Image: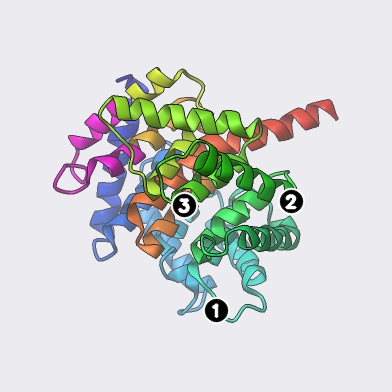
Amino acid sequence: MNDALNEKCELLLKNCSTIHRKYFLNDKLLSLMAGLIFTSEDKEADPQKLKECKKILEKNTGLLSNLRANPELVILSKMALSDDPEKYIKDVSEVYKKIHNGTKLENSYMALSAVLICDLGRQDEAEDLIAKAEQIKKLMNKSHPVLTSADDTSFIMFLALTDKSADTIAEDIEEAYVYLKDTCKVKASSDAIQGVSEVLAISYGDTKAKCDKVIRLFNTFSDRKAKFGNGSDFIVLGSLINVNTDTDTLVNDVLDAEVRLKELKGFKDDEMDRQKRMMYASMLVAETYGMQSAVIGNSIISNALTTVISKQIASAISFAVNIASSAIPAVCKKDDEEENNG
């Protein structure tokens, strides 16, 4: 294992341990999410700064606010990493109000969507992004009503943040879904196939080529006796397609990281199964391949909390966390190219 990857593993362990000692009454997975946020920024968690941010959060939000429910520890972590924690939470609160405006049932997924918009510095475009996300959701519901649910909310918002039109996004998702399920007959659940299709729709390029890389990764892991599940954890493979290395090297790196994590408290066999460790290992590997910006680290890890909220632990954590490493660079690269050509 290279030094950078080993350091990531060690930092993740340290951050999770630090946060869990401070917030031991919280679900341990929430401590892991917060640890991932700090690790993605190559920062050590600061309990005192988190305590200060909690006071700021309480001052700026109501007792029953969803910003202080399941996502609270994530939001505190992001506040602690921001230059101005009070401005950050005020921005998130304003965007959150716009997202749930007119909606009878507020939920934590809406709060995570607000975090995502602010992490990307797009709060001034909130109304347009919310409208686009609603359009995407309607198109997805039309194609697969049973597979589209509330826990897609924050990820649909991420899709809305790309430069693709709602129609193009829906078409890309459907093309990937049909190719993987009907043409390639991938042995994964319909939910998992839709999830990976959504991940692939974020980035640009030929849809079938991206699907083929997912299949190559899946088969290579299986050949190494390290098969990803055929359920929702299958989604994580879609986040690895843009890592700039060959398949064998990428798989070796993920498995090396998984072995290293297994040695650490919180990741041992009696605490976590191998497939979950492979998901976390995938996220750490992706980050060591140069995908280190604040945009990457802060924007997508928030989506990982959909896992904690829905308690579908194995899938959404890796799914959302790893999207960050592959998807944001693709989106930002296109933006940069257009700016340079403009």
184 over 135 or under it: above or below: above
Secondary structure under tag 1 reads loop
Residue corresponding to mark 1: 105
Q: What segment is highlighted magenta in the picture?
A: 255-280
Mark in front: 2 vs 1: 2
Disc 3 residue type (three-letter): Ser
Where is residue 11, by image quadrant? top left
Marking on residue 167: 2
Mark in front: 1 vs 3: 3
Marking on residue 27: none
Where is residue 331, by image quadrant? top right
Q: Position of residue 179 (x, y in %)?
A: 57, 39
Name the quarter where the N terminus is drawn: top left
50 over 284 or under it: above or below: below
Q: Position of residue 238 (x, y in %)?
A: 49, 38
261 relative to 55 in the view: left or right:
left
Q: Position of residue 71 (x, y in %)?
A: 44, 63
State how far apart marks 2 and 1 are (Cα).
27 Å
State how far apart marks 1 and 3 are (Cα).
27 Å
